[in-house]
Image (spheres, helix red, strand yellow):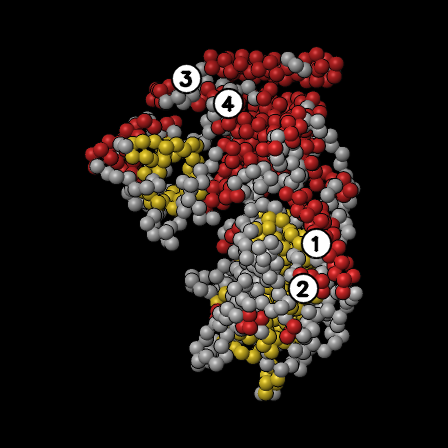
Amino acid sequence: MGEMFLHGLATDMEQTQRALPPHCLFCIPQPRSLLVDEMITQDVLYSHLLTPINIDDEPKRRLGEYRTFNGKQVVVVGSHVHTGKGFHDRRKVRILVSEKKAIQHQSVTVLHISRPLEGGINIPDDPCAIDIATFRKYTAILRSFPENELVFYQLNETINQVHKICAQDQVYERYKETLPAILREEWEIAVDELIQAGSFDDIDQDDRLQRIHEGGESHLLQLRQVVECYLMESLHDLVFPRVVASCQDQDKKLQHVMHRMRYYTPEDFGLRKEFQCFVSEARDTLLTIVEKKTPLDMLLVFKTCIDQISDAISRNVKLRQLDFEAYQLTTDDILDQLLFVLLQTFNQVTRRVMEVNACLASPFPIAAVIKYISDYHFINSNTTALGFTMANFQVAVEYFLMRGDHEDDCKDCLELALQDENAGTQCLQMIAESKCARAARKIRRDFRKSLANEELARRDTGTETGQEGTYSTSLGSTGDVVSIKSLSIVGEWSLPTCDEYEVENDTSSIGLLSVHPVEFVINGEEFAMSDTNIRQVSGGQRFFASVMEDGALFTWGDSTGGRLGYALADGDLRRVNCPQRVVALEQQTITQVACGAFHTLATDLNGHVFAWGNNSKGQLGFLSPSASALFIAVETPSVVEDLRGVYMSSVACGEYHSLALSSDGCVFSWGCNKYGKLGRAAEGLLEMTQPSLIDADWTGWPTDTKSRRGSRVRSVVSRIAAGKDHSLAISSDGAGFSWGRGDSGQLGHGCYMDVSEPMQIMAISVAVRGTSSLTDVAGGNDFSILLLKNGTAYICGRDPSLDTNKLFLSPTLLSLPSQLEREFFAQITAVSCGEMHYALLAKSGALLVSFKNFLQPSSDAGSTTAEVQERHITWVKEAGTVRQMVCGTSHTIIVA
C-alpha cells in the first residue's frame, strides 16, 4: 500500500507536470490501517500531500500549519498530525518515521503515519502495543472457547510450580538462571496450542488475505501478548522483587553516579540549546514504571516516555519559531534528553524517599527493570518501535554505569594530560563538573575576591566603606518610622506639554537618569509631597501606582486599556500626569499593588485581590463579559472571585501573567501559560484564566539530601516576583525558585530550557552552603537578579548593562563599576528589574541604576576597556536618600 501511495503521487506529478512547493510533506499510512478494497484516488492522495501555509509571507507564517492539496488544514505538533478544517472528523495521527524521497526528480519529505488522515481503520500506533484493558478483553475472548480451557489450565499449573520454586530461597537459587527460559518455553507451547485450536478460524477470507499479504499478523501477535501478560501478571510479585535483588549492586552503582551528577542539565549532557526542554511529562510517566505488573506494560511506559521526549522537543522548536527542516531530531538528541529525564526521575524519587525517612537499597531500580524486561518479555521486538525504545534505555543506563567505572588513575586521562594539543580535554568516561557546581565555585571565588578588593581599597584610602546611612526599607516594607511623602520618577516617560500623547525615548543620560518629582493634587493645588506617607509603589508600561499609609490607592500615567482603574472624562488626554485616587476602591484598605505591562492587581486588608486593565490572556483572573473582543479591557477594579476564602498577602505581575501569595505561603497563578510560566498544567483558556494553586515542593534542598532525611517540615513561599515571561519565588528557608521562559538563561539553571514547574536555583544554594540566604528577587525581559542576605546581588540571563550579548546561564556576581564597588560592595538591600534595566538600593539609601551603553555616563558610572568590561551602572545622586524603589518597564519609581 505504501508503494501504491508513492506510485500514485509519481503518476499524478508526471501527468500534471506539477512542481511541488518547498518544504511539502507526503503522508503514507501504514498498510494495516487501510481497507483491502480501498482505492487510492486523487482526492485521497491530495488529502495526504501537505504544503506549509503562508510559506512566502514570513511574518504571517506559523510553523507546523499546513494545507492539503485539496484545501483541507492540518497541524503538525511534535510526532503527531492533527487534522482540522475540511476533514470529516478530527484525528490525532502518529508519525512513525520520516524520510526523504525523490519523486519525479523532486525531493519530498515522506511521513509514515499510523493511520490515514481520513478513512481507513483505527489500529494501535505500534503493532506491539497492548494495554491492560485490551489484554483483559482478549483473555476473556480466548477463555470463552472451550477448546482453549486446557491451555489456560496448563498455564495455571506453570504458575503454581513457579510459586513453589519461589517459596524456598534455596530452590529458587537453583532455578534462578533457567527460570526465564522455562517460562519462555511454556509461553511458546501455549501460543502454538491456541493457534492449533483455531480460535480465529471464523475470520472471513478477505481479512485473512489482508493479514497475509500486508504483513498483518496482528492476531498472532495479540495471542503472544495475551499469553505473556497472563503468565507474568500472575508471577510479577514473585519474580520482579527477586530481579531487583539480583541487580542491587548495579542499581546502587547507578544511584551513586546519578547522585554525583544530580545537578546536570541538558546543557551538561551536550544537547543543542534549541532542543533543551523540561520534559516533566516524561519524568512523571517514568515514575509510574514500578507500579506496572508485566514486562510489556513496563516497556510501554518506556515507549511513552520516548514519545513524550520527542513531542516536547518538537513543541520547543515550534515555540521558538525555528525551521523544522534545519532542526531535524536525531537519535542522539533523543538519547541526550533521555539522560536528563532519567536523572530528574532519580532526583524526584530520592527526595520522596528522604521526606518519608525511607532507606531503600535503590529508590529507582532502573537496571532491574531493564533486566526484567530483557528476560521476561518473550516477543521479539528488535525491529519495532518498542525495540528502539529498549535500546535507548539500555544505552542510557550503560552511559551512567561507564562513568561509575572511571578510576582516578585512568590511562586515558593520563595520556590526555601528557598531550599539549588536548589541553583541557577530559576522558569521555569521567564525570565532569556540572555547570551548576562550576557556577557555585565561581560565585564563592568572586565573592572572596571582591572582599579582598574592598579591604585593600579601605586600607589605601584609610576610610571605612559601606557605612550605615539613613534607615532604608526595601520595596513592600510598611515601615512608617519616618515621614516618606516624596515620590519621584527616574527617567522621562512622556512630554507633558504635548497636545497628543507621546512617549519620550530620550537617548541621553540626562533623560534616562534625570529625576522628576511627582506632583500631588491636594485641595485643587499641586504639591511636591503627599499629605500622607507612601506605603508602597509599583510601575508598568508607562503607568504607575502608589499605596498610601491610609490604604488609599493612586494611579497615573497612560490610561489605555483601563489600566489606571478609572475612566477619564470625554475630551481628556489618555495621559494622567498627577496621581489620582482609584475611587472604585475607596471603601477598601489597599495593602499592596502590582503593575503588569497593561494590567494591575491590588490586595486589600481583608486579603482580597482586585484586578483591572487588559485581559486579553486571562491575566485578570476572570473571563471578560465580551470574550470575543480582540482587545479586552476592564476599566473598573473587580474582585478575583476564585481567590475568595484564601487570604492573599501580595501579588506580582508579568507581561501577561499574574501571581498571588497567600498568608500561609501558597502561590497561585493565572493568565498566559506560554513557556510554562504559570508553574502548573494549564492548556485551555478556562484553565489559564482561573487562578489555581501551584502544587510544588518549596523546600530548599541542600547539596547533600541526606541531611534532609527524616525532616517532614516543608517550606512555604515568603516572596514572589515576575519577569516578562518567567516567575520567581523565595522560600521560607531562603532558597530561590524560578520557572517559565529560560532561553536566555534567565532562570539561572545553567541551561536554555523553559521550566514548567518551580525549580530550585541550585547554584546559589550550593554556593552559600547555609552561610546566607536569598532575601529579594526580581525579573526583567530576559534576565533575573537575586539578592543574598549578605548584601551581594547576582544576575542571570542577558545583562542589559553590558555591551556584550553573552548570556549568564547560572547566577553570576553582579559586580559594580570600580568607583562604586568600593562604596557599595555587599551593601545592597533591594533589587528591582524593568524590561531592559535594573535598579539596586544600598543601605545608605543610594540608588544605583543600570543604563544603555549609548549613554554618556557620569564619573560614577562604569567604563569599558579592551582589557576589562565594567557594567554601565550609575549612582543617581539627584535622587537623594531613597527608602523605597521599584522599576517600571523603562523607568524607576522612588520614594524618599
Instruction: State the separation of the CA atoms marked 4 and 3.
Output: 26 Å
x and y percentages locating residue 788 in the rendered image? 71, 56
Q: Is residue 268 above or below residue 527?
A: above
Q: Quick check: 273 left or right of 42?
A: right
Of marks 4 and 2, the one in the foreground: 2
- Crowd tier of the residue under label 2, counting other residues whose Cα lies within 10 Å: few below 14, some 14–19, many 20 or above: some
Q: Residue at x 34, y 28 (%)?
A: 2
Residue at the disc numbered 2: 819
Of marks 3 and 2, the one in the foreground: 2
x and y percentages locating residue 126 in the rendered image? 46, 29
What element does badge 2 sit on? helix
What element does badge 1 sit on? strand
Q: Is residue 93 above or below residue 195?
A: below
**Residue type pointed to by label 4:** Ser
- Whether the residues at callouts 3 and 2 have beta carbons within 8 Å, the answer is no
Residue at the disc numbered 3: 201
Residue at the disc numbered 1: 731
Q: Dividing the image into 4 quarters, which one contains the C terminus?
A: bottom right
- Crowd tier of the residue under label 1, counting other residues whose Cα lies within 10 Å: few below 14, some 14–19, many 20 or above: many
Residue at the disc numbered 4: 381
Q: Quick check: 410 left or right of 742?
A: right
Instruction: State the separation of the CA atoms marked 4 and 2.
Output: 68 Å
**Residue type pointed to by label 2:** Gln
Quarter where residue 350 is shown: top right
Q: Residue at x 42, y 37 (%)?
A: 93
What element does badge 3 sit on? loop
